[in-house]
Image (tube, rainbow, N blue to C red):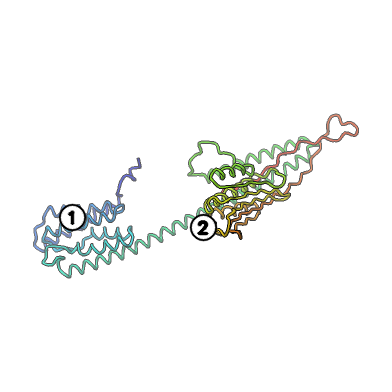
């Protein structure tokens, strides 16, 4: 069940508007009866009050509210000898239609409001000609006021959304700067401490130990500060009930190709060059490019055959997804070169790693998505030597185990 505010069809302001309209219309109705020498009828007064109370539903059901107000007004005008007039209640009901409804509904409402408000006990079907003209002018004035208010509301909402988006963008830039400062400062400190520990490991183990302790504290502090900033970014999200699954990489391409085959598209997969481990973010980018390309192929080219080719080169990794659409591609639809959020997302991921992405139609009617990501071979750092015991003549120095190189943090969109 929703909250109490959601269950109510009217608000406090709606109640104040309805009470005010009832007070104004009842006062005007009583003055008209005295001015025209007509006895004040209790039943007609209750109908005027009921017509005003119908305004409580004007926000959710503006057309129905106007219909009820006009119907009750016609009953009051036909049951009493008071001259018909354009009261505050029908004006508010018509204004609500002008603000909330589309143009066809508004035109229909305006066309029936003036004649029905002019209907009375006079000799003419719609009272006097002057009354009809006056009600038509009042109707036009209310409609124009409603249209102006609707345009103002739309401009206000557009401005509010623009300001909110600008505030979000500024906050993201601020958090990005803070993350950069934290990572740059602490990783620089960790790099210096690691270098100091390596330099002093052989001749001053105590200094090396102090450097390693400082490195550990700096890493722990950096992780804590980054978690705090990420908690700010995740504020408002629903808590995760299960641990996150590991991010896919280049090793998962066979799985996604198999899923593409199960979906009915003939998909080939080949690997060129000696495979090697890729940084997690690069592997994830390769996987997302292939995933999005195969999804677009199924969406725009039906079950036309596709080929996925992964190439390992000494200084880069390349991936191609070719859609083999025969002939001139008649009847097939391929994604445009610049359109679509999928291609935009692929370009952002590839550009983040300094790579290039090609997404273009082929001469044979197919479509090609090709990405190249630089993966330079990291130079092996100079390893400190540790003497073995005992070091006999001709025996070399034992090399310590290679440390694990930290991977770059994964970019999250």
The answer to whether residue 310 is seen in the rendering is yes
Q: Position of residue 32 (x, y in %)?
A: 14, 62
Residue under label 1 = 48
* Mark 2 residue crowding within 10 angstroms, few (<14) / some (14–19) / many (20+): few
Direction front: furthest residue: 327
Q: Which disc is residue 352 wearing?
A: none
Say whether residue 243 is left or right of residue 65.
right
The answer to whether one can see residue 186 in this image is no
Question: In the image, what residue occupies the spot 9% across and 60% down?
Answer: 38
- Which residue is more in the foreground, 152 or 274? 274
Q: In the image, what residue occupies the spot 49% across and 55% down?
A: 165
Where 109 sits versus 244, above or below?
A: below
The image quadrant that residue 190 belongs to is top right
From the top left corner, tell me how far across and down residue 148 is, in percent.
Answer: 34, 64
Identify the residue at the far right of this view.
393
Q: Nearer the viewer, mark 2 or mark 1?
A: 2
* Horizontal arrangement in the rendering, residue 164 relative to residue 114 (left or right): right
Q: Is residue 179 above or below residue 91?
A: above
Name the mark on residue 331. 2
Is residue 347 rendered to the left or right of residue 376? Answer: left
Nearer-the-camera pick, 63 or 304: 304
Residue plotted at (33% across, 43% down): 4
Q: Secondary structure at mark 1?
A: helix
The quarter in which the N terminus is drawn is top left
Residue 354 occupies which quadrant of the picture? bottom right
CA separation in Å, label 2 and label 1: 64 Å
Which SS class for mark 2? loop
Q: Residue furthest top?
A: 390
Residue 48's x, y, as percent?
18, 55
- Viewer-nearest residue: 354 or 314: 314
Earlier in the chain: of badge 2 and badge 1, it is: 1
- Horizontal and vertical percent position of residue 259: 56, 43
């Amino acid at each position: 069940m929703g909250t109490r505010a959601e269950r109510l069809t009217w608000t406090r302001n709606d109640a104040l508007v309805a009470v005010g309209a009832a007070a104004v219309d009842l006062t005007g109705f009583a003055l008209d009866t005295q001015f025209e020498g007509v006895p004040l009828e209790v039943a007609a007064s209750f109908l005027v009050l009921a017509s005003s109370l119908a305004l409580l539903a004007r926000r959710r059901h503006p057309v129905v509210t106007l219909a009820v107000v006009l119907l009750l007004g016609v009953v009051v005008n036909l049951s009493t000898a008071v001259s018909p007039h354009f009261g505050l209640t029908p004006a508010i009901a018509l204004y609500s239609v002008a603000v909330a409804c589309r143009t066809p509904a508004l035109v229909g409402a305006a066309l029936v409001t003036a004649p029905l408000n002019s209907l009375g006990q006079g000799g003419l079907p719609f009272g006097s000609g002057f009354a009809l003209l006056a009600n038509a002018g009042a109707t036009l004035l209310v409609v124009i006021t409603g249209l102006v208010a609707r345009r103002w509301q739309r401009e206000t909402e557009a401005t509010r959304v623009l300001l909110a988006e600008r505030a979000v963008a500024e906050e993201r830039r601020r958090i990005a700067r803070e993350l950069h400062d934290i990572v740059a400062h602490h990783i620089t400190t960790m790099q210096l401490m690691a270098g100091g520990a390596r330099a002093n490991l052989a001749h001053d183990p105590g200094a090396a130990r102090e450097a390693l302790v400082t490195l550990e504290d700096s890493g722990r502090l950096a992780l804590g500060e980054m978690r705090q900033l990420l908690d700010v970014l995740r504020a408002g999200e629903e808590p995760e009930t299960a641990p996150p699954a590991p991010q896919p990489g280049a090793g998962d391409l066979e799985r996604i190709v198999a899923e593409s085959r199960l979906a009915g598209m003939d998909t080939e997969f080949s690997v060129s060059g000696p495979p090697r481990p890729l940084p997690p973010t690069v592997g994830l980018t390769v996987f997302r490019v292939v995933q999005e390309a195969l999804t677009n192929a199924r969406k725009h080219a039906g079950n036309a055959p596709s080929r996925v080719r992964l190439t390992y080169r000494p200084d880069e990794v390349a991936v191609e997804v070719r859609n083999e659409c025969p002939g001139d591609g008649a009847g097939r639809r391929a994604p445009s070169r610049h359109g679509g959020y999928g291609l935009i997302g692929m370009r952002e991921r590839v550009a983040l790693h300094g790579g290039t992405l090609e997404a273009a139609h082929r001469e044979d009617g197919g479509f090609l998505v090709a990405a190249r990501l630089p993966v330079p071979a990291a130079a092996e750092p100079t390893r400190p030597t540790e003497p073995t015991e005992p070091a006999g003549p001709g025996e070399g120095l034992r090399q310590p185990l290679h440390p694990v190189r930290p991977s770059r943090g994964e970019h999250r969109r």
